[in-house]
Image (tube, rainbow, N blue to C red):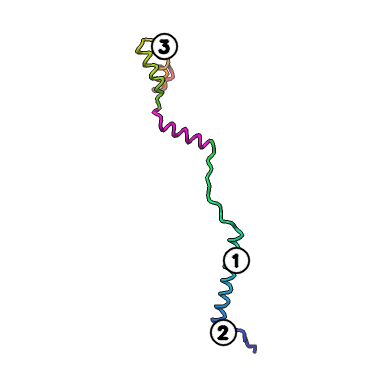
Amino acid sequence: MSINVNNNGVKNTAVDSKQSDTQLRARSENTAQAQASNPAPAKDAVSITPQAQQLNQLQRKAANSSGVDQEKVNSIKAAIENGSYKVDVERLAAKLAQFESDFFGTEDA
C-alpha cells in the first residue's frame, strides 16, 4: 500500500494562499506589461465625404427656402403691370389639355 505524503487530504491554507498571491502578482504584471506595450486605443472618429457635406448643405438650403422663385414672380408681376406680359394661348391650351389627360387618365388630348 502506497502512502500519499504530499497532501494526505489535508488542506493547507497557508500554501494555497501563497500560490494564489503568486498567481495574482503574475497576472497583474502581465496586465501591466500588456498595457505598457499597447498604447491607449485611438478615439473614435467620423469623416464625412464631400458628397455627404454637399448633400447636407443642399438640405439646409432647401429647408430655408420657400420653394418660390421670387425673382421670377416679381418680373412677371412687373410685366403684367406695365402691359408687356403676353400669354401664348396655344401653349396654354396644350398644357391644359395635357393636364386634363393626366388627371382624368384619358388618352385623347
Q: Does label 1 or label 2 sit earlier along the sequence?
A: 2
Dot 2 falls on a residue whose secondary structure is: loop
Q: Main secondary structure of the magenta part?
A: helix
Callout 2 crowding tier (Cα within 10 Å): few <14, some 14–19, many ≥20: few
The image shows residue 71 at horizontal and vertical percentages of 41, 21
Q: Are marks 1 and 2 in contact (CB under 8 Å)?
A: no
Decide if residue 29 is on the left or right side of residue 54: right
The dot on residue 30 is 1
Instruction: Measure the alpha-carbon separation of dots 1 and 2.
Output: 33 Å
Q: CA distance from mark 3 to mark 2?
A: 111 Å
Q: Which residue is mark 3?
A: 88
Sequence-first tag of 3 and 2 = 2
Looking at the rendered structure, the kind of residue marked 1 is Asn
Residue 69 falls inside the magenta stretch: no
Q: Where is residue 82? Give x, y as percent.
A: 36, 11
Q: Is 8 placed above or below 29 here?
A: below
Judging by the rendered image, the residue that carries numbered circle 2 is 9
Magenta span covers which residues?
A: 51-66
Q: Position of residue 25 (x, y in %)?
A: 57, 71
